[in-house]
Image (cartoon, helix red, strand yellow):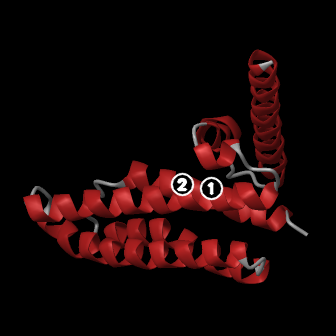
Amino acid sequence: MKFLLYLVMFFVLLNGFATAQTLIRNSCKKAAATSPKFKYNNLCVTSLETNPQAKTAKDLAGLVMASTKNAVTKATILKGTVDKILKGKKFNKMSEMPLRDCLQLYTDAIDSLNEASAGVKSRNYPTVKTVLSAAMDAPSTCETGFKERKAPSPVTKQNDNLYQMILIPLAFTNMLK
């Protein structure tokens, strides 16, 4: 009898994960079709299929929440990277001011992403779109600071990645009714 119960539970869990995987792949595919900058496999599917919260998402709002948390994590890591560069003083002198600006931009982006999470919980999707769009400006504004000073950016690849990580929940939010 216990065996039968365990077997049923196993198939229920397996079905739940398969459903979430289908939701992830279909949502990423639909988002990619609406935005030429959106990277379907490279980041969307991969980042969500490895996220425990996304694996249990039952709808698109659940994926918005999971992908927003992924973006918060990415922004926090990038902020730590820049802080470490500044503390280690291993950078071109012309890069110091843009690096300091980037720190503030990442802080603001993290705040915006956290506000987006709160907006998803309350189903306030217009606010979610606004604050995700604001957060999405951080990576490009950071890179612009380096270009204006004709300084090399040590975080170009990470900024490109952060941009993509923020684009995911924004694209999903745009798909919500």
Q: Which image quadrant: the C terminus?
A: bottom right
Name above or below for residue 167 compared with residue 50: below
Type of amino acid under label 1:
Ser
Q: Tell me the residue that label 2 is attached to.
A: 70
Q: Quadrant of residue 115?
A: bottom right
Q: Secondary structure at mark 1?
A: helix
Point out residue 166 in the picture as x, y percentages from the top left corner: 59, 61
Point out residue 32 in the picture as x, y percentages from the top left corner: 77, 47
Point out residue 170 in the picture as x, y percentages from the top left corner: 70, 65
Q: Tell me the residue that label 1 is attached to.
A: 67
The residue lying at 68 percent from left, 41 percent from top is 55
Label 1, label 2: how many angstroms apart (C-alpha)? 5 Å
Q: Nearer the viewer, residue 147 or 110?
A: 110
Label 1 packing within 10 angstroms: few (<14), some (14-19), many (20+): many
| Mark 1 touches mark 2? (CB < 8 Å) | yes
In the displayed structure image, the side of residue 141 where residue 36 appears, left or right: right
Most extreme residue toward the front, as rendered?
Answer: 1
The residue lying at 46 percent from left, 72 percent from top is 110
In the displayed structure image, the side of residue 14 where residue 137 appears, left or right: left
Q: Secondary structure at mark 2?
A: helix
Name above or below for residue 15 compared with residue 39: above
Type of amino acid under label 2:
Asn
Q: Which image quadrant: the N terminus?
A: top right
